[in-house]
Image (cartoon, rainbow, N blue to C red):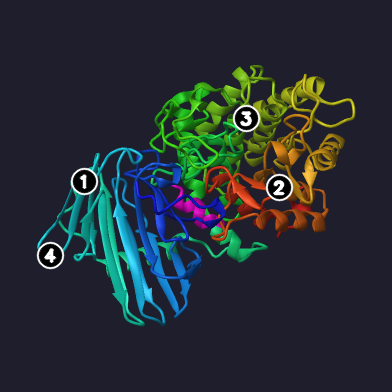
């Protein structure tokens, strides 16, 4: 690998994504993470986790970095201020992406100075473990390269020089001049005709304009659009949305909590669909319903918690024997396929109910809903791994989420033959859970044997498992405020006797849920404080990870974390509404 590009703090990365795969780009113009041809395939640029492979465009000489997204897109502008002026590089994966081939667009612009730029292209398949097998330039100045299964074509650098394990080039631009570089990568033979930069840029701009709603009715339209754009960038043509673009980024240094999130979690997909419904965005809602519905119709009560974007089983976890991101390990695959997570069925019902309220649940969707109800009927008594994917227990959150889903479906279609059964089953689950999991102080506890607070227990009430004025709802909110909250951030639960922040970071998903819970109680100022505090916990590009280290002001975990963006989007919409409308 190139030793000149080290990993950066997660705060400094931006995401390029086209729905079929994603890239992380650092402040030195270095793309150190990109999998091809799809999300969970091996990386061709893997320097992020200590493998080989990088594609960098970096100004020579002294400079400081900035950057921003063009509004309503994942088109990123790297921006460097040098001692003489400004240099920019416009970056994007051509959108929407093709399933088998990526097109990476990069356009240099010498804004107001002579630009001296170094370019390095080092593709290395198999997470950097495959060397560059071949590199040759045709008479028209186009480079063709291979590494492992990857076939690449690179336009715009006929003057590049093959050195070591890659290509290098020096580009000099006069003030105002622009220069395009176009990289394709595929595991199959490339098309005979190479893409034209101007046409690819125009198509990408047009596609983003058509894909992203204005969201002006939310309390934070720009951030809501950014969240929507990220979710759309993580969502494939088939509707499957990966939980994150990366693998193995640590939630806590050397703690062993490093996982591969390049798969579709049923729960996360349902969160995103509900957020889309709340904002009136049918494309993401329909995609979520389609993907979750297909999995339910195929696997029934044996629904897995997660799948690949193709709907196939998640591969088992394995080590790559790479150094990993600092503080972490290099792992691909995930043990989640071995788990049972009961709340997935409840979240699926909440998703289907949201679609039905929007009159977007078709006959196939109803078949999937019936399957989810049957699964809850058969399996609600079984221990499960729960939302946090821990040891199998009788998790309170899982049962209450099913109560919420059953009630939501019954309310959305009161005349449907399934409605009465849903209402009766919800009552049975709630009564049994209250008998087993209600703390003597009146709040919900984690399991029958674990009396501790858990921020996940706030969400079922927000979703309608119980009324806002139910004593158990209010007691649980007060308990989480008292035991898990710090300065309008909140932690999931207490791991041990250490201070909360020493065990893990504040959990941003739960921070937005707190905003929804306070809003539901009519505490509007507190709701907005929670929203503003947690939406500030992003990186320089506006991306959110799973956790936020309050002490160090750093992102923790894989990036970007889809469910955080989903809850930000939903909260931005809900806080613009009258809380009495959902009472």
Cα separation, mark 2 vs mark 1, equals 45 Å
Q: Label 3: few (<14), some or many (≥20) within 10 Å?
A: many
> Which is more N-terminal, label 3 or label 4?
4
User: Which numbered disc, 2 or 1, marks the residue closer to the eye?
Assistant: 1
> Which is more N-terminal, label 2 or label 4?
4
Cα separation, mark 4 vs mark 3, equals 57 Å
Reading the image, the residue beneath label 3 is 343
Q: Label 2: few (<14), some or many (≥20) within 10 Å?
A: many
> Which is more N-terminal, label 1 or label 3?
1
Does residue 317 sit above or below 93 in this rendering?
above
Q: Which of 120 and 66 is in front in this view?
A: 120
Does residue 336 sit above or below 505 in this rendering?
above
Residue 511, labelled with which disc?
2
Reading the image, the residue beneath label 4 is 140
Q: Position of residue 197 (x, y in %)?
A: 27, 67
Residue 38 image-quadrant placement: top left
Residue 384 image-quadrant placement: top right
């Amino acid at each position: 690998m190139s030793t000149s590009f080290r990993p950066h703090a997660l705060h400094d990365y931006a995401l390029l994504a086209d729905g079929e795969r994603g890239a992380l780009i650092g402040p030195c113009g270095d793309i150190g993470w990109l999998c091809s041809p799809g999300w969970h395939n091996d990386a061709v640029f893997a320097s992020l986790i200590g493998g080989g492979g990088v594609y960098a465009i970096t100004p020579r000489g002294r400079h400081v970095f900035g950057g921003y997204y063009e509004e309503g897109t994942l088109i990123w502008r790297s921006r460097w201020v040098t001692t003489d002026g400004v240099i920019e590089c416009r970056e994007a994966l051509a959108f929407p992406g093709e399933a088998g081939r990526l097109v990476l667009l990069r356009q240099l612009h010498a804004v107001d100075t002579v630009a001296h730029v170094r370019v390095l292209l080092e593709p290395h398949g198999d997470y950097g473990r495959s060397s560059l097998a071949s590199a040759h330039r045709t008479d028209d100045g186009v480079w063709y390269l291979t590494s492992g299964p990857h076939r690449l074509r690179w336009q715009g650098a006929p003057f590049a020089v093959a050195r070591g394990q890659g290509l290098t080039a020096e580009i000099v631009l006069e003030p105002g001049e622009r220069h395009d570089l176009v990289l394709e990568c595929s595991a199959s033979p490339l098309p005979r005709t190479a893409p034209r930069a101007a046409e690819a840029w125009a198509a990408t701009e047009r596609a983003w304009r058509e894909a992203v709603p204005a969201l002006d009715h939310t309390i934070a339209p720009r951030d809501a659009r950014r969240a929507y754009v990220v979710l759309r960038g993580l969502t494939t043509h088939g509707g499957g949305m990966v939980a994150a673009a990366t693998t193995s980024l640590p939630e806590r240094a050397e703690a062993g909590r490093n996982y591969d999130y390049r798969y579709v979690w049923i729960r996360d997909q349902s969160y995103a669909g509900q957020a889309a419904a709340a904002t009136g965005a049918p494309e993401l809602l329909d995609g979520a319903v389609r993907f979750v519905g297909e999995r339910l119709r195929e696997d029934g009560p044996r629904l897995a918690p997660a799948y690949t974007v193709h709907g196939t089983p998640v591969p088992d976890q394995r080590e790559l024997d790479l150094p990993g991101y600092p503080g972490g390990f290099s792992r691909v695959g995930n043990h989640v396929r071995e788990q049972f997570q009961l709340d997935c069925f409840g979240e699926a019902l909440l998703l289907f109910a949201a679609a039905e309220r929007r009159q977007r649940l078709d006959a196939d969707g109803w078949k999937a809903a019936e399957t989810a109800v049957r699964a809850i009927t058969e399996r609600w008594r079984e221990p499960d791994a729960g939302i946090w994917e821990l040891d199998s227990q009788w998790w309170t959150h899982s049962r209450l989420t099913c109560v919420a889903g059953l009630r939501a479906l019954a309310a959305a279609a009161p005349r449907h033959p399934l409605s009465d059964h849903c209402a009766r089953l919800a009552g049975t689950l709630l009564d049994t859970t209250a008998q087993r999991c209600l703390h003597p102080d009146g709040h919900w506890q984690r399991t029958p044997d674990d009396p501790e607070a858990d921020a996940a227990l706030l969400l079922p009430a927000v979703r309608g498992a119980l009324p806002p004025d139910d004593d158990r709802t209010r007691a649980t909110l007060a308990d989480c405020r008292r035991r898990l909250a710090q300065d309008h951030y909140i932690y999931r639960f207490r791991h041990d006797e250490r201070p909360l922040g020493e065990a893990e970071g504040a959990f941003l998903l739960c921070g937005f849920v707190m905003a929804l819970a306070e809003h539901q109680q009519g505490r509007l100022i507190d709701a907005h404080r929670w929203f503003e505090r947690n939406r500030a916990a992003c990186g320089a590009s506006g991306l959110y990870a799973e956790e936020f280290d309050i002490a160090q002001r750093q992102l923790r975990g894989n990036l970007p974390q889809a469910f955080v963006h989903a809850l930000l989007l939903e909260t931005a919409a809900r806080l613009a509404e009258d809380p009495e409308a959902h009472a």
